[in-house]
């Protein structure tokens, strides 16, 4: 199943939403990759492995389930998560792309590919709908947490240095 959606970060038409800079957004997306336990409630542990130019490996533990993945960083553009096939898990990916259609509007496009293709039977279509909804809710939570961290100054360059 492939699925993508957009979340608007800055909206010049809505004065109730605090504006986040592209740099703050980038630092928040990197923080989500490096410290996912802040963002993913059922994740028990994340161990960062080997780092190379623009990427790093991780080991994620959800109870007895362990998943290895690789995170690729394209500064101020995208964070790409790649999960290679392992055990019962198919190869999959998630890309979080920063988009700035105007200087005042900032968006994140979330692109999922679970590696399983599209289903045509009703039971699996219903399961795919559930996954799409869960992904979207998780992404909304990610943005909510990023907004909170930005509001507390925790995504400012001076705070992180």
Image (cartoon, rainbow, N blue to C red):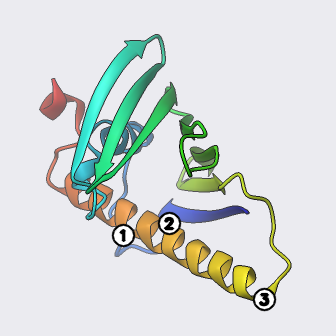
For mark 2, does the 10 Å Cα neighbourhood hold few (<14), some (14 to 19), or many (20 or more) residues?
some
Task: Find the residue positioned furthest to the top.
Answer: 53
Decide which of 76, 43 is in the foreground and name it.
43
What is the secondary structure assignment of the residue under circle 2?
A: loop
Query: From the viewer's perspective, is residue 101 above or below residue 1?
Result: above
Q: Quadrant of the N terminus?
A: bottom right
**Which numbered disc covers residue 11?**
2
Q: Mark 3: few, some, or many residues within 10 Å (few <14, many ≥20)? A: few
Task: Tell me how far mark 2 sits from mark 1, CA to CA.
Answer: 7 Å
Q: Are marks 2 and 1 in contact (CB under 8 Å)?
A: yes
Distance from the alpha carbon under mark 3 to that under mark 1 = 39 Å
Upstream in sequence: badge 2 or badge 1: 2
Q: Which mark is residue 122?
A: 3
Residue 68 place in picture, x, y as percent: 43, 36
User: In the rendered view, does 139 fall on the left or right side of 17?
Assistant: right
Labelled disc at residue 155: none
Q: Is residue 54 visible?
A: yes
Q: Which residue is mark 1?
A: 17
**Which of 49 and 153 lies nearest the eye of the viewer?**
49
Residue 10 drawn above or below residue 51: below
Q: Earlier in the sequence, mark 3 or mark 2?
A: 2
Identify the residue at image location x=72%, y=79%.
124
Q: Quadrant of residue 147?
A: bottom left
Q: Residue at x 36, y 70 (%)?
A: 17
For the point 29% across and 54% down, which residue is it?
64
């Amino acid at each position: 199943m492939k699925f993508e959606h957009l979340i608007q970060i800055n909206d010049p038409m809505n004065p109730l939403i605090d504006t986040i800079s592209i740099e703050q957004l980038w630092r928040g997306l990197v923080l989500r990759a490096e410290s996912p336990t802040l963002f993913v409630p059922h994740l028990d542990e994340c161990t960062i492995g080997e780092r190379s130019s623009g990427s790093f490996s991780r080991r994620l533990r959800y109870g007895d389930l362990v998943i290895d993945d690789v995170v690729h960083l394209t500064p101020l553009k995208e964070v790409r998560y790649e999960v290679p096939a392992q055990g019962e898990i198919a190869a999959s990916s998630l890309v979080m792309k920063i988009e700035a259609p105007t200087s005042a509007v900032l968006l994140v496009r979330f692109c999922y590919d679970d590696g399983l293709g599209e289903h045509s039977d009703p039971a699996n279509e219903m399961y795919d709908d559930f996954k799409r909804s869960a992904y979207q809710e998780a992404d909304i939570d990610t943005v909510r947490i990023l907004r909170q961290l930005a509001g507390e100054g925790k995504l400012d360059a001076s705070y992180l240095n």
